[in-house]
Amino acid sequence: MTHQFRVRVYYEDTDLAGVVYYANYLKFIERGRSEWVREMGVDQVAMKSDGIVFAVRRVEADYFMPAMYDDELIIETRVEKLTGARLVVRQGVMRGADLLFEALVTIVAIDQSGKPARLPANIRPT
């Protein structure tokens, strides 16, 4: 299953040429992951109260084409690999049918001391 989340490129997302600043793609995909997790019923505020938070362990990113001021983008998120302690998702930033950016993101859960923890039951495989 692929989750989709729409974002609009605002002036603040761009450089002087109206091109999206490269680091902002990481913000876009973070928003896409947050909405995907919310739609799965994971309450990250409750998780934090229980002493568990998500942490990005690794990002592999490729930039293919620039997004521009006022573009409407679609952030696509899909699971590549899932274990009891690690989640790997592939995320793409699309403008229509064009793939502008793609990242492979490894996410782990950690406790308050920064040590690994189990992923929430509604995410991990049964």
Image: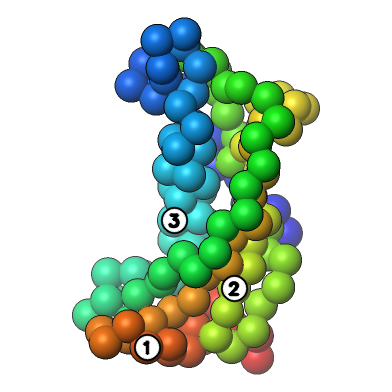
**Sequence-first tag of 1 and 3:** 3
Element under label 1? loop
Q: Quadrant of residue 82?
A: bottom right
Q: Amino acid at mark 3?
A: Ser
Q: Work out how far the residue at label 3 is from the one at label 2, CA to CA, in angstroms.
A: 14 Å
Residue 68 in the image: x percent, y percent? 54, 16
Whether residues under marks 1 and 3 lie with C-beta atoms below 8 angstroms apart, the answer is: no
Which mark lies nearer to you, 1 or 3?
1
* Residue farthest toward the left in the current orientation of the protein: 49
How packed mark 2 is, by other alpha carbons closer than 10 Å (few <14, some 14-19, many 20 or more), is many
Element under label 3? helix
- One can see residue 11 in this view: yes
Q: Residue at x 34, y 69 (%)?
A: 44
Whether residues under marks 1 and 2 lie with C-beta atoms below 8 angstroms apart, the answer is: no
Identify which residue, 63 or 67, lies in the foreground.
63
Against 80, is 21 above or below? above
Disc 3 target residue:
34
Q: Residue at x 64, y 62 (%)?
A: 89
Q: Amino acid at mark 1?
A: Lys
**Sequence-first tag of 1 and 2:** 2
Against 7, is 76 above or below? below
**Sequence-first tag of 3 and 2:** 3
Q: Amino acid at mark 2?
A: Leu
Disc 2 target residue:
87
Disc 1 target residue:
115
Residue 110 in the image: x percent, y percent? 38, 82
Q: Residue at x 58, y 22 (%)?
A: 67
Query: What coloring was used for the rendering?
Result: rainbow
Identify which residue, 50 or 12, lies in the foreground.
12
